[in-house]
Amino acid sequence: MRIGLDFDNTIVSYDALFHKIACERAPLPLDIPKNKVAVRDWFRNAGREDTWTELQGYVYGARMDEAVAYPGAIEFMRSAARAGHILGIVSHKTKHPFLGPKYDLHAAAREWVEKHLIEEGKALIPPERVYFELTKEEKLSRIAQFHCDVFVDDLPEILMAPRFPANTRPILFDPENNHAATFPSPDAVVLSWDELAVRLSG
Ligand SMILES: [Mg+2]
């Protein structure tokens, strides 16, 4: 099976890291949970949208190495690779942040993959199967070119896009259970990587 994976908020969880870095920048109220959306909403409600935008560039550019994989993600990739499945990463992000220093966000993400997605010193996903595209449209084209049997993403708008390939099975990674009620195929929603492993083996 050819398994395509999104990167940000599917493989990589930024919840703890955004909370930590926000605390370095601003006295966050103690009741703000360690959650990226909660941190974003706090900056927005405080009228500090620009600070939030700049903070994202800093996290994805300068502090990327501190981000962690979701529980079960690396184990999933290890057992899928051992079972002979072909894994690829297809993501889209801008090359540089919208605000602040011009970090190379693609390079930072690639370095994260090289450092974190390894088994016994060997890449779980070789660099030629790691695609960081610039736009959502380019990402959709790449998903089609990669001939994914399955594609896993945290964004319904990717999986439900008119150009999402008809012969690729969409799976929504929804760890906070935000979309189960609204996503058109509830049986295509998984809450964890462990659940994904079970779903694909069934
Ligand atoms: Mg994502």
Image (spheres, rainbow, N blue to C red):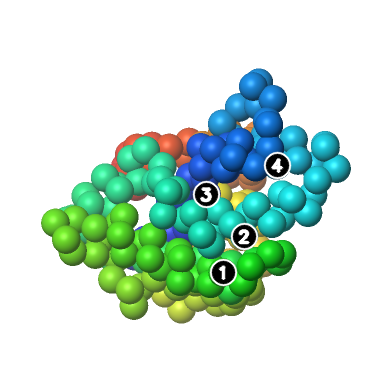
Residues at discs 1 and 2 in contact (Cβ within 8 Å) = yes
Is the residue marked 2 within 8 Å of ligand 1, measured from its CB?
no
Which-is-in-front pick, marks 4 and 3? 4
Q: Percent from the top left, x then y, of residue 191?
A: 48, 36
Q: Are marks 4 and 3 in contact (CB under 8 Å)?
A: no
Query: Visible in this render: residue 15?
Result: no
Q: Name the residue tied to disc 1.
A: 103
**Residue at image point 36% right, 62% down:** 113
Q: CA distance from mark 4 to mark 1?
A: 20 Å
Given the image, on which type of amino acid does mark 2 rest?
Answer: Gly
Element assignment for label 1: loop
Q: Indicate yes or no: mark 3 CB to ligand 1 under 8 Å.
A: yes
Element marked by disc 4: helix
Give the residue furthest to the top: 31
Q: Nearer the N terminus, badge 2 or badge 3?
A: 3
Q: Which residue is mark 4?
A: 40
Work out whether mark 1 precedes mark 2 in sequence or the reverse, and give the earlier one: 2
* Residue where numbered disc 2 is placed: 57
Asked if disc 2 and disc 3 are in contact, CB closer than 8 Å, the reply is: no
Q: Does mark 1's beta carbon lie closer than 8 Å to ligand 1?
A: no
Q: Nearer the viewer, residue 145 or 57?
A: 57
CA gap, disc 4 and disc 3: 14 Å
Q: Is residue 190 visible?
A: yes
Other-residue count near label 2 (Cα within 10 Å), few / some / many at <14 / 14–19 / ≥20: many
Tell me: residue 97, above or below residue 50. Answer: below
Say which amino acid is labelled 1. Answer: Tyr
Q: In terms of sequence position, does the residue under pointer 4 or pointer 3 come before the other? A: 3
Give the distance between the C-alpha atoms of the residues marked 2 and 3, in whole angstroms: 15 Å
> Label 1 to label 2, Cα distance in Å?
7 Å
**Which one is nearer the viewer's eye here, 82 or 57?**
57
Q: Which mark is residue 9?
A: 3
